Image (cartoon, rainbow, N blue to C red):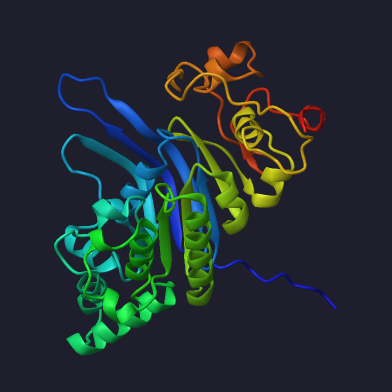
């Protein structure tokens, strides 16, 4: 009897060679995103990881069609249902946002309207995309607030954002994003402004709701701990390009790019001997080479060799991952550092 493997589902979202450049006449262009490609399949949880300024949030805004029109040039493809969202008109994107693709932004205080009760803001999403009356939308908004763990949701419906804590405001944003059962949820640093305890609670709520709705998830974060708990695959970004892409287990078990290894070494580990110092990545994200001249990470890299400062590495397909590096970490080096 011949065994046949089940074909993997077609990608829900395909990002191909996405590039975003900011610049105005007379100023030097800034390549915020360059040659970024990845796919998200139905129900899959994908992480986009990197320090501030790596291009993560710009990538998400390009997908959602929320970048300004002036001073911004985009190229490549963002394919959704066979259509390139970069070429979609405003009306098409307005129909997609909230219904098929939803986003949780990193700062709820600036994402929520300060002069409109949170209940109205949640029910407005439902009424915008579904044919329901005000009463039904309000009832569903109350149920959503209860589902995301907000106490006394009936009373909270009439409150304004400033009357809620940061954790509750973030829960309201999650409720708004999942109100219409989107196929893809993009979470952009959803716990940045929260303390550690509230971060864990919000992430647990997000994890449960994404599982309940079977939505695909694009998690944008600088925190590898968040990735470890939520994502199946991870794309590591540096200076606008993906430098390593693989499954979560392979990334944490055997990072190959020096930048990925540096991110992991910067995290405290419970299994490390007491007093073991952390090894932060030297320098800052502003210390980069243009990709046209070499590897952008070379000025901060402990593994750099001559080619790193003379030519740009391409993203190569290896047996278990994609990697952009001339001198990757080896298993021996990883064991010595652990």
At 55% from the left and 30% from the top, the residue drawn is 314
Q: Determine whether, in the image, residue 4 is placed left or right of residue 122.
A: right
- Can you tell which quarter of the image residue 326 is in? top right
Q: Position of residue 288 (x, y in %)?
A: 46, 19
Q: Where's the C terminus, which quadrant?
A: top right
Is there any visible trace of residue 65 in the rendered image?
A: no
Query: In the depicted view, which residue is nearer to us: 314 or 194?
Result: 194
Q: Where's the N terminus, which quadrant?
A: bottom right
At 30% from the left and 63% from the top, the residue drawn is 164
Q: Determine whether, in the image, residue 48 is placed left or right of residue 114.
A: right
Is there any visible trace of residue 213 in the rendered image?
A: yes
Q: How many badges with numbers are in the image?
A: 0
Tell me if residue 186 comes above or below residue 269 in the rendering.
below
Q: Position of residue 246 (x, y in %)?
A: 63, 46
At 81% from the left and 32% from the top, the residue drawn is 335
Residue that sits furthest to the right in the current view: 1
Tell me if residue 160 comes above or below residue 326 in the rendering.
below
Q: Position of residue 160 (x, y in %)?
A: 21, 65
Q: Determine whether, in the image, residue 134 is placed left or right of residue 243.
A: left
Q: Determine whether, in the image, residue 265 is placed left or right of residue 237.
A: right
Tell me if residue 116 comes above or below residue 188 in the rendering.
below
Query: In the depicted view, which residue is nearer to us: 108 or 127?
Result: 108
Q: Position of residue 318 (x, y in %)?
A: 68, 40
């Amino acid at each position: 009897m011949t065994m046949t493997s089940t074909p993997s589902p077609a990608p829900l979202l395909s990002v191909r060679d996405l590039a975003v450049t900011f610049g105005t006449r007379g100023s030097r262009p800034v390549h915020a995103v360059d040659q970024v490609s990845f796919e998200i399949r139905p129900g899959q949880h994908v992480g986009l990881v990197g320090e501030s300024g790596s291009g993560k949030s710009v990538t998400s805004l390009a997908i959602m069609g929320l970048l300004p029109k002036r001073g911004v040039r985009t190229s490549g493809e963002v394919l959704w249902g066979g259509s390139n969202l970069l070429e979609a008109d405003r009306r098409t994107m307005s129909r997609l946002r909230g219904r098929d693709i939803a986003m949780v932004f990193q700062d709820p205080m600036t994402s929520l309207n300060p002069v409109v009760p949170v209940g109205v803001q949640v029910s407005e999403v439902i009424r915008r995309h579904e044919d329901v009356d005000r009463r039904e939308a309000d009832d569903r908004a109350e149920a959503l607030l209860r589902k995301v763990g907000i106490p006394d949701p009936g009373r909270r419906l009439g409150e304004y954002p400033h009357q809620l804590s940061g954790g509750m405001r973030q829960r309201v944003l999650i409720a708004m994003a999942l109100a219409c059962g989107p196929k893809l949820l993009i979470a952009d640093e959803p716990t940045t402004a929260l303390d550690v305890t509230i971060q864990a609670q919000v992430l647990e709520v997000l994890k449960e709701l994404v599982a309940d709705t079977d939505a695909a998830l694009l998690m944008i974060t600088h925190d590898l701990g968040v990735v470890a708990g939520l994502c199946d695959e991870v794309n590591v970004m540096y200076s606008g390009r993906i430098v390593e892409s693989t499954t979560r287990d392979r990334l944490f078990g055997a990072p190959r790019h020096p930048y990925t290894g540096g991110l992991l070494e910067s995290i405290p580990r419970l299994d490390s001997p007491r007093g073991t110092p952390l090894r932060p990545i030297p320098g800052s994200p502003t210390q980069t080479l243009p990709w046209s001249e070499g590897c952008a990470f070379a000025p901060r890299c402990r593994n750099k060799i001559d080619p790193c400062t003379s030519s740009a590495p391409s993203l190569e397909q290896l047996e278990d991952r994609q990697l952009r590096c001339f001198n990757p970490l080896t298993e021996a080096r990883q064991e010595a550092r652990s």
